[in-house]
Amino acid sequence: MARNTGPRGRVCRRLGIALSNITAKDPDKDPALRRPYPPGQHGASARPSVSDYGQRLREKQKLKLYYGLMEAQCRKAFLEARRSPGNTGRVLLQLLERRLDVVVLRAGLATSIRQARQFVRHGYLLVDGRRTNIASYRVKVGSEVRFSLAHRELPIVKESFERMKARQVPGYLQVLDGGQGVRCVREPEREEIPVTLNEPFIVEFYAQRV
């Protein structure tokens, strides 16, 4: 399966996103905050104008970066959102927020989308008591996500439990058993989704291509 494993610091600088917004990175060491301009020899001095197409493309690239997705995955999610009732941009984000790896990240059980995806793919997690190793699995309202008994004593998993206790999770998630699991209680509202995006631009970008 294709994966994007390249460095994210340069991409964050190019798109104007703080790396600490998508990982648990120390803001003092955040390359996008220390050098808030595009990478490259002339990044600090260049002031390029951006076309309408460029603005839409940038928003789509930001979406892929926030959720760690490949182009085909973004396109598939958009098509599903367009077929669903309601505002397409909002529905698109709600669909992505209910991916298993994203739920793990939002709950504080992982420090980045890559770590969350690694937990899922290695079979650490149970959804309603069943081992699930598909990162794109859609967590249903009312479903519970927990680490399996075989993995709860791992140091990295124990760190996740402690991190979850100290973290305020979004209102659409309910913490279970003192931080050892989470339940999805409803669909997320737009203001609860911690991504800075212009959804209409993303919808317009894909509407012209699919």
Image: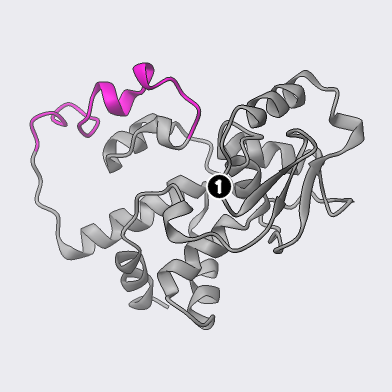
Classify 10 Å Cα crowding around label 1: few (below 14), some (14-19), many (20 and above): some
Give the answer, above or below, for where 130 lies relative to 95: above
Q: Nearer the viewer, residue 80 or 196?
A: 196
Give the prevailing secondary structure in the magenta stretch.
loop
Question: Which quadrant of the figure has residue 200?
Answer: bottom left
Which residue is identified by label 1?
Answer: 170
- Is residue 118 visible in this depiction of the protein? yes
Question: Which quadrant of the figure has residue 42?
Answer: top left
Give the answer, above or below, for where 70 lies relative to 117: below
Colour convention of the picture: one colour
**Residue depicted at x 30% and y 29%:** 32
- Is residue 72 visible in this depiction of the protein? no
**Residue depicted at x 51% and y 49%:** 67
Q: Secondary structure at mark 1?
A: loop
Question: Which quadrant of the figure has residue 172?
Answer: bottom right
Q: What span is colored magenta in the figure? A: 23-46
Q: Position of residue 39 (x, y in %)?
A: 25, 30
Q: Nearer the viewer, residue 201 or 190?
A: 190
**Residue depicted at x 34% and y 32%:** 10
Q: Nearer the viewer, residue 14 or 81?
A: 81
